[in-house]
Image (spheres, helix red, strand yellow):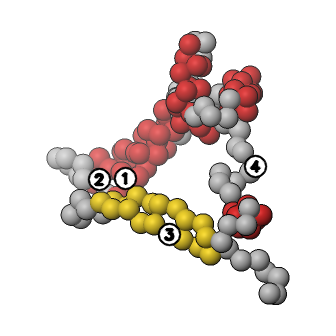
């Protein structure tokens, strides 16, 4: 690899007497050589996360479902485990159930309780003129069976 770099350097220097003018291909080759040299020196990127640490993150997230990545990251720092918060979020156990109820369960809950109307209030904030307001929505619950 070094011989290739020296040959290329010699070609560039022979093209110009005063100052070498690098082309796009020259810059690409030098960038590739520098990148290869850095990788071979042992700096490939982030250090890998051990399997033991990954298992601990998954266990903590399963046992404490209300904890997010910042809280688990803080607990790991207390245990002298140096890992980034984004890496903690990457290895957290994911919940299989949806985060909120579906329309089917919503309607089933309100039809069972013989409610005819279900309503909810939403807070709305506009970005352009800083206007704020509330929106109240309602839905009439009926069964699918014929009357």
Which mark is first along the chain, 2 or 4? 2
Give the residue at mark 2: 22
- Rounded to the nearest angstrom, the CA distance separating label 4 from label 1 is 52 Å
Cβ–Cβ below 8 Å for labels 3 and 1?
Answer: no
- Depth check: 17 or 88 in front? 88
Q: Nearer the viewer, mark 3 or mark 1?
A: 3
Name the residue rendered at 60%, 31% in the picture. 67
- Rounded to the nearest angstrom, the CA distance separating label 4 from label 2 is 55 Å
Percent x, y of residue 106: 69, 63
Cβ–Cβ below 8 Å for labels 3 and 4?
Answer: no
- Rounded to the nearest angstrom, the CA distance separating label 1 from label 2 is 6 Å
Which mark is first along the chain, 1 or 4? 1
Classed neighbour count for the residue bearing mark 1: other residues with Cα under 10 Å, few (<14), some (14–19), many (≥20): some
Classed neighbour count for the residue bearing mark 4: other residues with Cα under 10 Å, few (<14), some (14–19), many (≥20): few
Q: Nearer the viewer, mark 2 or mark 3?
A: 3
Give the residue at mark 4: 96
- Write down the quadrant of residue 111 in the picture: bottom right
Name the residue rendered at 40%, 58% in the picture. 123
- Rounded to the nearest angstrom, the CA distance separating label 3 from label 4 is 29 Å
Percent x, y of residue 128: 24, 64
Residue 51 vertical placement versus 142 (above, below): above
Name the residue rendered at 56%, 13% in the picture. 78
Residue 137's label in the rendered image is: 3
- Write down the quadrant of residue 34 in the picture: top left
Label 4 SS: loop
Cβ–Cβ below 8 Å for labels 1 and 2?
Answer: yes
Q: Nearer the viewer, mark 4 or mark 1?
A: 4
Label 3 SS: strand
Q: Nearer the viewer, mark 3 or mark 4?
A: 3
Residue 26's label in the rendered image is: 1
Residue 101 vertical placement versus 73 (above, below): below
Classed neighbour count for the residue bearing mark 2: other residues with Cα under 10 Å, few (<14), some (14–19), many (≥20): few
């Amino acid at each position: 690899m070094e011989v290739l770099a020296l040959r290329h350097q010699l070609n560039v220097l022979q093209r110009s007497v005063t100052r070498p003018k690098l082309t796009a291909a020259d810059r690409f080759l030098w960038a590739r050589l520098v990148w290869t040299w850095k990788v071979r020196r042992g700096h490939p990127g982030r250090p890998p996360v051990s399997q033991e640490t990954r298992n601990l993150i998954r266990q903590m997230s399963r046992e404490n479902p209300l904890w997010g990545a910042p809280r688990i990251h803080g607990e790991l720092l207390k245990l002298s485990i140096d890992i980034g918060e984004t890496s903690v979020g990457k290895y957290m156990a994911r919940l299989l159930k949806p985060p909120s109820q579906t329309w089917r369960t919503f309607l089933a809950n309100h039809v069972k309780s013989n409610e005819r109307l279900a309503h909810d209030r939403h807070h709305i904030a506009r970005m352009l003129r800083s206007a704020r307001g509330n929106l109240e929505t309602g839905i009439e619950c009926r069964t699918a069976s014929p009357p």
